[in-house]
Image: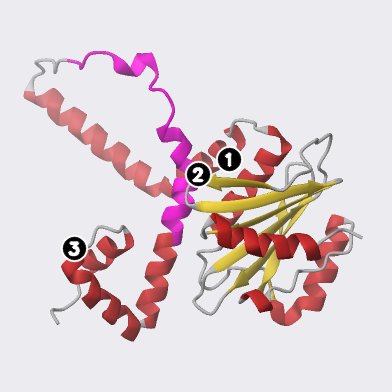
Amino acid sequence: MNPVTEAELQAWVDGRLAPARRGDIDIYLEHHPHEAERLRAYRQQNVALRAVFGPVLDETIPRRMLRPRWRLPRWPLQRYAASLAFVLAGGAAGWLLHDRVDDDAFSALAQAWPGRGAGGALAHQAALAHGVYSPEVKHPVEVGADQQEHLVAWLSKRLGTPLHPPRLAPLGYELEGGRLLPGEHGPVAQFMYHDGNGQRLTLYVSSGQRDSKESGFRYAREGGISVFYWIDGSFGYALSGVLGKAELARIATAVYQQLQPS
């Protein structure tokens, strides 16, 4: 087998690898689990990016951006050199600030998401949280399942109701842990599960739901992330994962039957 290159691994992540080479890459990843884990994280990051930025691609292009192309003025060579230096300096500054800019853009898009009712907002926030934390390799949760008693007591206290993470082992998923998140109307609990292949699910429990008539069991899809969600009184629940609708519905039904505020 020919040596595997980084370019081929990235093509595998993007689904653009030549069919004749896919078998070789699959064999390579079977013998290099750390590389397989890295590429899996890249794929989930791609899903998260599509969930956040996908709607922007569907927006209508503003009319002011459809103007005719500018003609390049006939500047002296010195002015071209000065302009080039200015662009390069700006690019360097942009690179130094790129983490901050990305975070600001990410937050702005999350806040500017068009309203679709309490349930639609719940589904979007749940998908966003899943996309952010499920790709994490070292810190996917704040408190691990080995401290489940502490995790449940802590999140129950913060949300103001006893929480009982559903048992999904019969469906092939074990509790990995959880974390506390800020919500639009109050604190949010996120429980994370994983199966034997590293596939992750997250259960998003949001407090402070108000004036909602959306009490049914609903489905949404944000980018590549599927979400089943429902609202019960002042609490909203959303199960998210990169799964097909039928499979996620089977798991969400089990969650719905188990997880209820008492």
Q: Check disc 2 and report the residue beneath it.
A: 52
Give the alpha-carbon distance from disc 3 to disc 1, as whole Å: 36 Å
Residue 243 visible? The answer is yes
Instruction: Specify which label sits upstream in the sequence, 3 or 2.
Output: 3
Which residue lies most toward the right here?
262
Which residue lies most toward the bottom here?
31
Give the alpha-carbon distance from disc 3 to disc 2, as whole Å: 28 Å
Bin the neighbour count of mark 3 within 10 Å (Cα to Cα): few under 14, some 14-19, many 20 and up: few
Above or below: residue 206 compared with residue 200: above
On the rendered structure, is 107 left or right of 233? left
Q: Check disc 3 and report the residue beneath it.
A: 18
What residue is drawn where x is 61% and y is 44%?
124
Q: Check disc 1 and report the residue beneath it.
A: 110
- The answer to whether mark 3 and mark 1 are in CB contact below 8 A is no
Q: Tell me which segment is drawn in magenta.
A: 44-70
On the rendered structure, is 165 left or right of 73? right
Amino acid type, residue under disc 2 in the picture: Val
- In the rendered image, residue 68 lying in the magenta stretch gets the answer yes
Amino acid type, residue under disc 1 in the picture: Ala
Bin the neighbour count of mark 1 within 10 Å (Cα to Cα): few under 14, some 14-19, many 20 and up: some
- In the rendered image, residue 227 lying in the magenta stretch gets the answer no
Question: Label for residue 99?
Answer: none
What residue is drawn where x is 30% and y is 59%?
15
Q: Position of residue 120 (x, y in %)?
A: 66, 39
